[in-house]
Image (cartoon, rainbow, N blue to C red):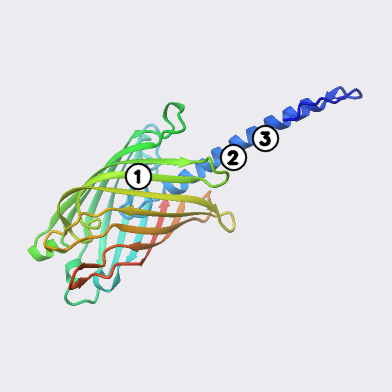
Amino acid sequence: MNFEVKENLANGVSTLTLATHRSTTTRLLTVVSLVLLLSTATSLLAQNLNWEGQTGAFVTPFAYTSSSPGSGFGHPALSFHYLNAGDVIGNEFQASITAGFLKRFEIGYTRSFNAAGDNATLSPLFEGGFNIFHGKANLLPENAWKNNYLPAISAGFVVRSEVRHVGGVLNNADTTNGDAYLVATKTITQVPKLPIVLNLGGKATDAAVLGIAGNAAAWQGRLFGAAGFVLPGPVKSKLVVGSEFAQEPHHIQGLPGATLPTTLTYFVRVLPNPERPINVDFGVAQAAGRVLPNADVQARAQFALGISYRL
């Protein structure tokens, strides 16, 4: 800062005083801008429902929870997701409702539907839908105790019931599988006008590709994560460009020798108007391909769509 003072004897006002006021105003505007950027990033990435109805990215949960007051429940959020999973698995649909409560918890329900593919041998393994129940508790709020380096940390669970995919079809029985996870999420605002959200978690699971491929052969510990950044879009909209990964259990129950790769997604989240509680996701999912030498489920580079709306 230039501390040279030039007194104006006519009006008794110094250039230093004016410069100081301008500097204070600039700092105040900078702080306000960072707060707004943080708020926008958190709203865009934290309030959208993922594939299974959790607050998260496209297929992975965040440590943030659905908005709610300190006492009672918040307004519920509704979502619809679609995945063109290829000619073998067919078209997958998800309808979800999720609500936050007591500012640090969320709970929700999702119903999964399947429109069968046209492969006479493999498509029957993926027919039918199932139930998904989920919950999450925020253990540590983001920036706790005024430490802006601390992420939000949450624990959660997922229970899927009436799953009759792959092993369930082969054994002619409904199955149940689930996840128990711990996740940390942090919004970074050090890069001017480019908020970045990083997410990393671990889970114990016995589900194969979120239940779409039925049950895993055994419970396993798996990692998941996501990263995204916020960009200005046309007509006051905001865009979130991101990617995520979810490690899968190695083997599928009922299909000895079958192996699963890590699931990847690439997505763009659109908030048409920050004042309206609606988000739209467009994505590409990289799920299972050739799981056996003679079995290719063709679920690679598949289009996905998600829409979330808060009542």
Per the rendering, the mark at residue 26 is: 3
Q: Which residue is label 2 attached to?
A: 33
Is the residue under label 2 in contact with that under label 3 (CB below 8 Å)? no
Point out residue 261 in the picture as x, y percentages from the top left corner. 26, 60
Amino acid beneath label 2: Ser
- Local SS, label 1: strand
Q: Which residue is pictured at 26% across the width and 43% down the height?
A: 181
Cβ–Cβ under 8 Å for marks 2 and 1: no
Q: CA distance from mark 3 to mark 1?
A: 35 Å
Name the quarter where the N terminus is drawn: top right
Give the percent coordinates (x, y) of residue 4. 80, 26
Residue visible at 24% across and 52% down in the picture: 132
**Amino acid carrying mark 3 in the image:** Thr
N-terminal of the two: label 2 or label 1? 2
Q: Position of residue 41 (x, y in %)?
A: 49, 45
Q: Which residue is mark 1?
A: 200
Give the CA separation, mark 2 to mark 1.
Answer: 27 Å
Mark closer to the chain start, 3 or 2: 3
Numbered-mark total: 3
* Residue at x-position 7% and y-position 63%: 171
Which residue is more in the foreground, 5 or 30?
5
Amino acid type assigned to the residue bearing label 1 in the image: Leu
Number of other residues with Cα within 10 Å of mark 3, as a class: few under 14, some 14 to 19, many 20 or more = few
Residue 89: mark: none
Q: Compare marks 3 and 1 and give the one earlier in the sequence.
A: 3
